[in-house]
Image (spheres, grey):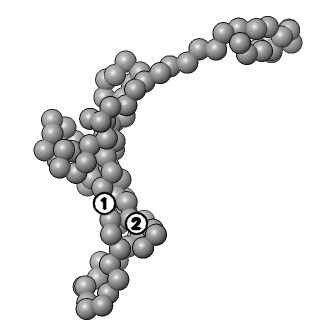
Amino acid sequence: MDVHQDPLDLILDKFPTFGLVSQASAEDNPNFGQAMNGPNAEEFWDASAREISTIQKLRSWTQVKRTQGMNVIQSTWAYKTKRFPDGLVRKLKASFCVRGDM
């Protein structure tokens, strides 16, 4: 049990700690193929387009022609389904991730 201090009368009380628990499943973290071919494919495409648009607006990269000997950094997409505590889908997210260790 946690100790709680009432802000009005400054009396310390003990009360049980409450929390919401939600469990993520594998379908909440699809890979590229699953996201783009699954039931939420259109929404994941939209989320991916928003991510690319944001990256371009921030001028995080410049597209260049690949040349011989150029060090190309690997990248991947990460997808996430955000849910309300009752399990309903709240938001579909797409993140473009670059391997910073390369």
Which is more toward the observer, 76 or 53? 76
Are dots 2 and 1 in contact, CB under 8 Å?
yes
Q: Residue at x 21, y 44 (%)?
A: 35
**Residue at the left extreme of this rendering:** 37
Viewer-side residue, 6 vs 54: 6
Q: Residue at x 25, y 85 (%)?
A: 66
According to the picture, the residue beneath numbered tag 1 turns out to be 76
* Residue 90 in sight: no
Q: Secondary structure at mark 2?
A: loop
Residue 6 visible? The answer is yes
Give the quarter of the image for residue 49: bottom left
User: Which residue, given by chain and number where applicable, does mark 2 sit on?
Assistant: 99
At a point 17% along the width and 49% down the height, the residue shown is 33
Residue 91: x and y in percent read 33, 36
Q: Regarding mark 1 in the picture, which secondary structure is present there? A: strand
In the picture, residue 39 is in which quadrant?
top left
**Mark 2 / mark 1, whichever is N-terminal:** 1
Is 49 drawn above or below residue 60 in the view shown?
A: above
- Marks 2/1: CA distance? 8 Å
For the point 38% across and 65% down, the residue is 98
* On-image quarter of the N terminus: top right
Q: Is residue 84 above or below residue 101?
A: above
